[in-house]
């Protein structure tokens, strides 16, 4: 087993003073001298969809353990179903894991690497009288399963001879049966209180090429016959998985017990530990449902910024660190709970606050004319990029007679304590001057078309004597230097905290889609420096929120995505 330091990832995942229960279990195994002191985990995705934020939790846990114990973590694609799997998914999964900052040991591995071995083990089980070919239909087999409280019925094929089963399994392998005509089943216990032990299927017939093994096989192992043994083949020490696999554990152990019976004890025998999966409100995480959103064009692909996928979060402007911090904050538990989406957003805010330069963008512009400013004069105003981080330096933004501010930053008849602009009132234009509102221009319908102000030349930001204070500070852009861009503002994709939770009452998750989850602002006014933005660059649009440049943006039409607001706008709603 190779678990060298070069496989280790340098990211800050918890060193945790309080170790979660999985760490405690691993500590005990190491203290007991198990597995020669090795720790090898794995991340085992099925390549039938893109990774989502739930997978990120599992990734952070498995790669975090590898780092903290100076072990390793394998990437293994559990590719046992050629019907649903695709190389597109394989590639995206690798890209997303790397983006999160993790590196697996050696080459990626595949359950299909073990198809020969699994086939041999199937033969071994048949020879031991522990597996048989069943020619009943799937419906018949299901009808015989019984219920958790009543035992199942034994199949009429259960006591077929070893010779006959070997011959039948060979006929399955060599393509002499059609799909669904027969399956190979383990012979365990039709009365077991654990339904997974009631003669589960091991192999099924699928006449379909596989993305790696091509036409070599027309029989494919079921996930349950492949998963535990694949871990064993790789020398995995700790097979960490979500709680729903707890009831599969006795089956995985049973398969390995049969295979290892009479053999010398192996150096490493994997042990499964379960933890609670991540549930997040206002979203769905089932790959089947996510695929539906993509296929039906409800979203703009797997990486739509409203998707809970890793590539969606990336396109939305989340950083790898914010996703890892989220996984750490959520923690590892034995019991399921639902995490508030706001926690994910606060992790993004925290990271972006430090790294995103602060720029000026006006999303709903209204013209401002500085009446006493010379017609052709342009001043370059020096502005720090991020007061949280001096190393980000400063830049210059042009100021002239014509500007834009946000329409909502002006009120003709303001209430008390209104600190923005109103007739006769003063505000500071951030990084520039204090201005006073003198008058407004309106169109025939009474809409304000321009606001006239005068500036106080003694109040230039950063200049000696410019310390006169006013209560309000506004962001602005020069109307003569800014450029137009598209800004996409996102809201939750669903209106219901648990959109997938109403199926029992006959409601499809898509009934809960939020019709206003995407707002497109087509002519936002951007400060000139944003022309140099590169895809996925992060920014704080001052007083508005965090944004990034969409990767599909072009120089002719720049598109910015809103990552998250400056504050938790939903908490504000709740407190109203
Ligand atoms: P499906 O949506 O088809 O049930 P899945 O989400 O279980 O699929 P896999 O590809 O089988 O997808 O998952 C790979 C790994 O990620 C597994 O170890 C699984 O336990 C883990 N995982 C999946 N969803 C979550 C989640 N919500 N929280 C934590 N871990 C998860
Ligand atoms: Mg799964």
Image (cartoon, rainbow, N blue to C red):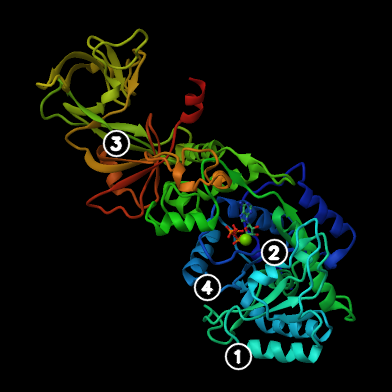
Q: Name the residue located 53 percent from the left edge and 36 percent from the top edge.
A: 342
Residue 266, percent from left and from top: 84, 75
Separation of residues labelled 2 and 4 (CA atoms) = 31 Å
* Numbered-mark total: 4
Separation of residues labelled 4 and 1 (CA atoms) = 20 Å
Q: Nearer the viewer, mark 2 or mark 4?
A: 4
Any part of residue 439 in sight: yes
Which numbered dot is residue 396? 3
Residue 82, percent from left and from top: 54, 75
Is disc 2 surrounded by few (<14), some (14 to 19) or many (20+) residues within 10 Å?
many
Report ligand 1 position as a quadrant: bottom right
Is disc 3 surrounded by few (<14), some (14 to 19) or many (20+) residues within 10 Å?
some
Q: Nearer the viewer, mark 4 or mark 3?
A: 4
Q: Which residue is mark 1?
A: 176
Is disc 1 surrounded by few (<14), some (14 to 19) or many (20+) residues within 10 Å?
few
Q: Which residue is mark 2?
A: 72
Q: Nearer the viewer, residue 572 or 336?
A: 336
Q: Of helix, strand and loop, which one carries label 1?
A: loop
Answer with left or right where residue 136 lies relative to residue 367. Answer: right
Answer with left or right where residue 74 lies relative to residue 95. Answer: right
Q: Nearer the viewer, mark 3 or mark 1?
A: 1
């Amino acid at each position: 087993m190779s678990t060298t330091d070069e496989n280790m990832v340098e990211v800050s995942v918890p060193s945790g003073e309080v170790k979660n229960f999985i760490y405690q279990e691993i500590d005990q195994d190491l203290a007991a001298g198990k597995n020669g002191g090795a720790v090898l985990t794995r991340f085992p995705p099925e390549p039938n969809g893109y990774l989502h934020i739930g997978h990120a939790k599992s990734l952070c846990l498995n790669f975090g353990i590898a780092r903290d114990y100076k072990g390793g973590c394998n990437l293994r694609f559990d590719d046992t179903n050629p019907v649903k799997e695709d190389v597109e998914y394989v590639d995206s999964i690798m890209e997303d894991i790397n983006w999160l900052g993790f590196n697996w040991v050696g080459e990626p591995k595949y359950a299909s690497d073990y198809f020969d071995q699994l086939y041999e083990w199937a033969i071994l089980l048949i020879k031991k009288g522990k597996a048989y070919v069943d020619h009943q239909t799937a419906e018949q087999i299901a009808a015989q399963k019984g219920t958790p409280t009543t035992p199942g019925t034994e199949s009429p094929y259960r006591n077929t001879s070893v010779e006959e089963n070997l011959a039948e399994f060979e006929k399955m392998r060599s393509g002499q049966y059609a799909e669904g005509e027969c399956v190979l089943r383990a012979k365990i216990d039709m009365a077991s209180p654990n339904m997974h032990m009631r003669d589960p299927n091991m192999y099924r017939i699928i006449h379909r090429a596989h993305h790696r093994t091509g036409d070599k096989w027309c029989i494919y192992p079921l996930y349950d016959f492949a998963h535990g043994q694949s871990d064993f083949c790789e020398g995995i020490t700790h097979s960490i998985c979500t709680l729903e696999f707890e009831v599969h554990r006795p089956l995985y152990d049973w398969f390995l017990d049969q295979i290892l019976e009479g053999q010398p004890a192996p150096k490493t025998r994997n042990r499964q530990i379960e933890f609670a999966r991540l549930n997040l409100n206002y979203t769905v995480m089932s790959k089947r449902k996510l695929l539906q959103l993509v296929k039906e064009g409800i979203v703009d692909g797997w990486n739509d910024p409203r998707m809970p996928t890793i590539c969606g979060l990336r396109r939305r402007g989340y950083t790898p660190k914010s996703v890892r911090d989220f996984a750490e904050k959520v923690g590892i538990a034995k019991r399921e709970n639902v995490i508030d989406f706001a926690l994910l957003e606060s992790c993004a805010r925290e990271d972006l606050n430090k790294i995103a330069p602060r720029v000026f963008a006006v999303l709903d512009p209204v013209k401002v004319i500085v009446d006493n400013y010379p017609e052709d004069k342009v001043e370059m105003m020096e502005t720090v990029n991020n007061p949280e981080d001096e190393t980000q330096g400063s830049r210059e933004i042009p100021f002239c007679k014509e500007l834009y501010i946000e329409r909502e930053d002006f009120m003709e008849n303001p209430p008390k304590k209104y600190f923005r602009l109103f007739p006769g009132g003063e505000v500071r234009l951030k990084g520039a001057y204090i201005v006073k509102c003198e008058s407004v221009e309106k169109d025939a319908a009474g809409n304000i078309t321009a606001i006239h102000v005068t500036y106080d030349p003694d109040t230039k930001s950063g200049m000696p004597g410019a310390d006169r204070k006013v209560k309000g500070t506004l962001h602005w852009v020069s109307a003569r230097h800014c450029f137009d861009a598209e800004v996409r503002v996102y809201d939750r994709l669903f209106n219901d905290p648990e959109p997938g939770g109403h199926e029992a009452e006959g409601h499809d998750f898509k009934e809960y889609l939020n019709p206003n989850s995407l707002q497109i602002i087509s002519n936002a006014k951007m400060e000139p420096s944003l022309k140099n933005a590169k895809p996925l660059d992060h920014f704080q649009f001052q007083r508005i929120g965090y944004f990034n440049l969409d990767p599909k943006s072009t120089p002719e039409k720049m598109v910015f995505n809103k990552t998250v607001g400056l504050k938790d706008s939903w908490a504000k709603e709740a407190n109203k």
